[in-house]
Amino acid sequence: MEGLSVVIALVVLVVITVGMGIRIVPQGSKHIVQRLGKYHSTLNPGMNVIIPYVDQVPYKVTTKDIVLDIPSQEVITEDNATIIANAVAYINIVSPEKAVYGVEDYEIAIQNLVQTALRSIVGEMSLDAALSSRDLIKAKLKEAISDDIADWGINLKTVEIQDINPSATMQKAMEEQAAAERQRRATVTRAEGEKQAAILEADGRLEASKRDAKAQVVLADASREAIERVTQAIGDKEMPVMYLLGERYINALEELSTSTNAKNILLPADLPNAVKGLLNR
């Protein structure tokens, strides 16, 4: 019985040892093998054989694309404006041994690299340029960190700027500035309208004055021509002139006396002579 127990124990030990020596690596992963504490090899997807008790697999690294979310941070632009920016990086591990032995934690390291590079790039740009140049920031950001993470066996596939917005304080200041600008434009537009209206009104008055002046000239010419014709017709004869003037004078007195607003009647200063003149006509 004791011999059977020993055999069974040896069989179990052999099975366990064989199981420890066979490693199945799933697709999309690679395993790092250390032999006596030192890097030995990298296991590819599929079945692999290692030496039990001597070889160990302390790291299992994915070969799929990894999405790293870069936390939001405050960034100061060249014109001392504060903006909030965050990004997302897509990486792929091409050399797992470099990724695990070249840096303590490659994810934290890449996040810090992206944040530092982003602060540096945006710090050299104005607020307006930073808000409208995502593609430029993306290109500079990729160029800045690609070489650094390549030393860790990691390939930066792309990096995208998720959000880049002014801070709450800056947004309020920009809104106030925009409101002031709209008010200024409205004031300028209103002033321009009043100016054009005044110009048009002045032009109208000028044109009316010119037309009134021309009308007065025409009336004066007509009066002058009428006087000349009357003078030519009368000649040196005095009675026709006196007759015309007396007739107009009487007509004016009649219209004044029949007016509803007439309160006074005007009489000639030399009434007797005027009457005699009219009777002797």
Image (cartoon, grey):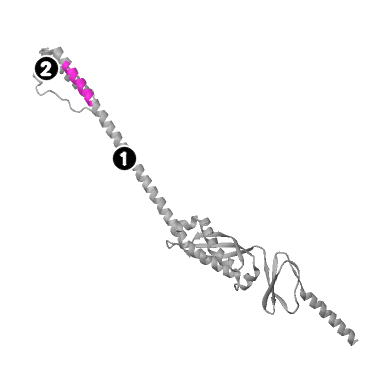
Is 257 a magenta residue?
Answer: no
As drawn, which residue projects farthest toward the right?
Answer: 1
Q: Position of residue 199 (x, y in %)?
A: 31, 38
Identify the residue shown where x is 59% and y is 66%.
Answer: 150
Image position of 74 (left or right of 273): right
- Mark 1: secondary structure: helix
Q: Position of residue 111 (x, y in %)?
A: 57, 67
Is 221 a magenta residue?
Answer: yes
Where is 131 relative to 51, above or below?
Answer: above
Q: Which residue is mark 1?
A: 198
In the picture, the disc for residue 7 is none
Q: Position of residue 115 (x, y in %)?
A: 53, 66
Neighbor class of circle 2 (other Cα within 10 Å; few <14, some 14-19, many 20+) is few
Q: Amino acid at mark 1?
A: Ala
Where is 7 relative to 224, above or below?
Answer: below
Image position of 149 (left or right of 15): left
Image position of 115 (left or right of 267): right
Q: Position of residue 68 (x, y in %)?
A: 60, 64
Residue nearest the observer in this picture, 132 or 267:
132
Q: Which residues are magenta?
A: 216-228
Residue nearest the observer in this picture, 117 or 272:
117
The image quadrant where one finds the N terminus is: bottom right
On the image, which quarter does residue 202 sit in?
Answer: top left
As drawn, which residue projects farthest toward the bottom?
Answer: 2
Identify the residue shown where x is 22% and y is 26%.
Answer: 216
Mark 2 or mark 1: which comes first in sequence?
A: 1
Q: Which residue is mark 2?
A: 275
Neighbor class of circle 1 (other Cα within 10 Å; few <14, some 14-19, many 20+) is few
